[in-house]
Image (cartoon, rainbow, N blue to C red):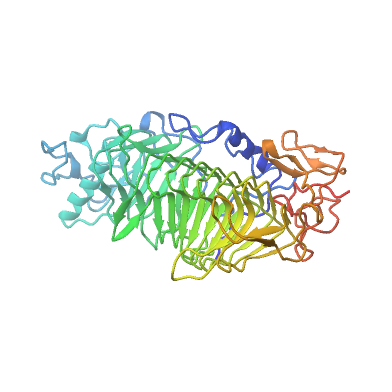
Amino acid sequence: MRCHSLAGRSIGWLSVLSALWLGACGSDAGGNHDSGGFAGLSSGLGGRASVNGGASSTTGGTAGGAASIAGSDQSNSGGVSSGGAANVAGASSDSEGGVPSSAGAASATAGTAADAGGAAATASGLTNPIHVVAGATLDVADGTLTHPFPTLADAVTAIHATEALASPWTGRIVVHQGRYEVRATVELPPSADIEFQAGATMAMAADVNLHANRSVKVLGTEPLPVVFTWLTDGKHWGSFTLFVPESQANEFTWATFEHGGEVTYQGIAVRGALALEGSGGHISHCTFQNNAGDDGLSLGNSPAVVDHCSFLNNSGDGIDVDGPGGEEIAFCYFDANGNDGLDIGEGSDLWAHDNVMINSVDTGVEVGEASHPTIDHNIMVGNAMGIGIKDDADPIVSNNTVYGNQFGITGYHFKADYGTGKGRVNNTIVWGSTIADVALVDGASTQFSYSCIQSGKYTDSTNKNGSGSVAALAGVGVISAGAGCDDPLFVDAAARDFHLKSTAGHFDAGSHAWLNDTATSPCIDSGAPQTAVGDEPAPNGGRVDMGVYGGTAEASHSP
């Protein structure tokens, strides 16, 4: 079942993305997301709603790393422990780096009140939540905000020590603002939720991983993102994994995942710097960049919503989605990924909309392995292939603008256990392809209708030298150069402004005004008659436009 949480479509969304095309995208050296970012995408004439039901990010960091977490969801907040505030980690530490011993876990005076941050001692004597603050002193640490642990590993060791004494503990670990060096893989206990607060930076050593086994909250803000990066330049860390089907309310907000890699965990090859396998949640305003694994973000059967994220210069795919998890990928920006921007497989039923995919070494959006996603209102520019459909995949591809790719849209066969690509393409503009607008290989049955295909033809080969037989592309409502669409009349394709010119006015992304042109695009009012005009402003001719703005509040006026 698809978990669509984004509704409507705002005006001006591409004007914000265009700032990213001009180099404002991503995070700076400190991991901060550019302040221009994707802000304001839910406002404007069309009024695109913000994420419905999505978890909101925190609005501020923790000053000095020791602010209270008043208002958090722990039980007994600010209360009095019935068992006393035992100091499990306050015993002597060993000589191997200060790992606390379970011996000497003496309890404090019974009835000791919770610390000023609201952390109450549990029956085991270990507080909930457990606080981690960079620079804290391990010798006196007990997990309270007054005496927090200095590292996440120390907090996990304390939990294990408590449980070794047959004192069950369940609760939350809170990692406060600060820089933490993670020199060995940390696997969180099944009893522990984890929360990373704004301004936390996890500097990960080579091949080190972080494995979560319960709920995860990464609560960065625009000025204070949470950053997962390498400890030593040139030495990639592994992966942050979450393999918990019961954990669906996870949140990753304003976080940067960079210089990660991949790992094999629980017998599964995890190829993303962040990997959710069976887990769901909301990933918003995050940046995945310069990761060395096969994926920046890996989602397997994960009912996740991913919105307003950037995927930049990852060595493989920006996002890889496998399985019918009902994912939604929206308002994301993909640039210069080493394989695909978005790779969809293993029967996926995701919905990808309002995204921009540029400069992929392979494909902007790749669909395979009997997947049947919906791909609408996206822009693909400068990729080897704009949209690739293979291996019995049967997507619905509607209202996309595919411009300046080597191959515009391809249908082909890759894996022996599958047939050729299928799919239905409508209301889409394919223009400026450097080799071929359409390639249909090995009997691919991809169907085209009510679309502007510059050449009006297809080739039966995806060879980069352009070899192969060429034939006319069949399809109701297909127009092409010399046959109804001599030029789609983009406002400024060189500047990647793909609004359609109109004598009655096109939407100007810079001024948010309507500007009249001296000519009208043949793609206006040329979409499929059965497609609703949606949010197109009047006058709209009662028929949807082709291209990325058809059916949206940014559709050009009908003359």
What residue appears at the point 82 percent right and 55 percent down from the top-left corner?
Answer: 484
Up-down relation of residue 256 to residue 393 (above or below): above
Name the one closer to the observer, 207 or 338. 338
The spot of residue 529 in percent (x, y) is 79, 64
Q: Is residue 382 left or right of residue 139?
A: right
Q: Is residue 214 above or below residue 288?
A: below
Q: Is residue 356 left or right of residue 453?
A: left
Judge whether residue 366 can be spotted in this image: yes
- In the image, taking residue 16 as reference, residue 507 lies left or right, namely right
Q: What is the count of numbered marks?
A: 0
Quadrant of residue 502 within the rendered picture: top right
Instruction: Specify the quadrant that holds the N terminus.
Output: bottom right
Give the quarter of the image for residue 170: bottom left
Q: Position of residue 501 (x, y in %)?
A: 80, 43
Where residue 153 appears, as percent x and y from the top left, is 24, 43
Q: Position of residue 34 (x, y in %)?
A: 53, 32
Q: Nearer the viewer, residue 319 or 245?
A: 319
* Residue 171 seen from this side: no
Residue nearest the observer in this picture, 180 or 366: 366
